[in-house]
Amino acid sequence: MAGSFTAEAGAALVFLILYVFLWSYMTFMYARKRYEWKSRYSILYLHTTIRVASQACGLAFAILAWRNIDVFVAYLILSAEGYFSLTIAAYYFLKHYEIKHFGWSRLGPADHNEGGRKRFLQALSMVAVLMPWRFWDRNLLMIVDAWLIPANAIIIAGGSIMAGLNDKSKQLDPDDYNNRLNVSKGLRTAGQAVFLALTVLFILLYINAARKGRGLKHSSERTMSKTALAIFGVVGGMLLVRGIFGVLQAAVYSLSYSNPENYDGHGMKSRFTAIEYCLAVVPEFTAAFLLNMSYWSTAREPSVELIDPEDNATEFVRTNRGGHETEYAAEDKNSKYETVPKYTP
């Protein structure tokens, strides 16, 4: 019977409240001008907004059950979009950390417009997929974007097909049902595999950043760097859990949304709800929360002078402690700051 408040509804409500709190916190940070609109936080803000909508749809489906299949489809699509935006946000946060501490990042240049139209069109062109060597050294994020966008699209397509299989109003013959199920499974598995591969890449880049971070000389830099890196390490772990579960859920029928055994007349069964929230929703929320908290470990950190990877000279080290910007010459042997060598590809 529809209209009952089930365990699924309770879980959806709890995380709806948590995401509303996180969204409100980010809105407050924007209002206080601590977050900039054209920054990595805008992508995270988009993720939080999407997840608020996703959890609202999840709550509606838990209460309405099968009376409105469109709510279930919306939940699946918004969940995929939330995962997509969170993965991109994690990369941009790591890029910002590297630029702030090392003066440059393999992930991309130090521009402030993280979600520009030009970059989106470049990613859609798939040039980075066809000619990755043009982006590997100094704009790796373009390759990541170019793979994530189509992967996200095929996950949504597969999820929409799968949701249609649960529509009781459609009477499909067994062959048609199996064909659609296989297409849905193939699309979702392929898309989730791309997300998992890019999560592994994120972890490898994080390990490389952690290795370089150990070379920071000033004690306060090391302390703040360790805090930020610890956050990114946990975020990478959460995304890895989410990625592995995504692949398993697409490939293993017992974990799939398309398995009728995972539902009853009220919607999702309690066991399936617990698995879904523990391995998908909790890791995403934890990662989003920690990325927000990384602001407090990076806002007062000293920043180095930006480095052009094509230039083999050395640069000054710049600090912004106390709100004052001071430069120390590389030749000053008495300075407590070290010169930052330029990277040579």
Image (tube, grey):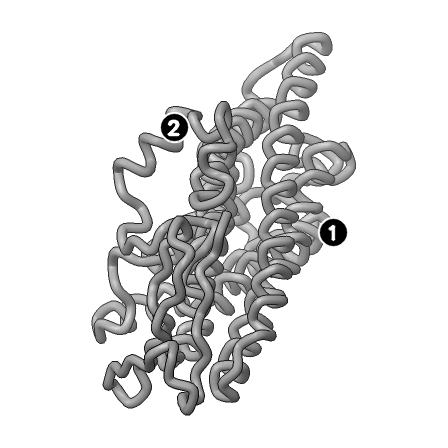
The amino acid beneath tag 2 is Leu
Which residue corresponds to the image point at 45% horizontal and 55% vertical from the top-left? 105
328 with respect to 84 (left or right) = left
Within 10 Å of disc 2 (Cα), the crowding (few <14, some 14-19, many 20+) is some
Within 10 Å of disc 1 (Cα), the crowding (few <14, some 14-19, many 20+) is few
Examine the rendered structure and indicate whether residue 308 appears above or below residue 197: below
Which of the pair 49/219 is nearer the observer?
A: 219
Examine the rendered structure and indicate whether residue 72 appears above or below residue 215: above
The amino acid beneath tag 1 is Arg
- Say which quadrant the N terminus sits in: top right
Which of the pair 213/273 is nearer the observer?
A: 213
Mark 2, residue position:
124
Q: Position of residue 230 (x, y in %)?
A: 59, 72
**Disc 1 secondary structure class:** helix
**Disc 2 secondary structure class:** helix
Which residue corresponds to the image point at 51% horizontal and 40% vertical from the top-left? 136
Residue 135: quadrant of the picture: top left
220 with respect to 258 (left or right) = left
Q: Which mark is residue 131?
A: none
Mark 1, residue position:
271
Which residue corresponds to the image point at 61% horizontal and 23% vertical from the top-left? 165
Q: Position of residue 64 (x, y in %)?
A: 50, 43
103 with respect to 168 (left or right) = left
Which residue corresponds to the image point at 29% horizontal and 53% vertical from the top-left? 111
Residue 45: quadrant of the picture: bottom left
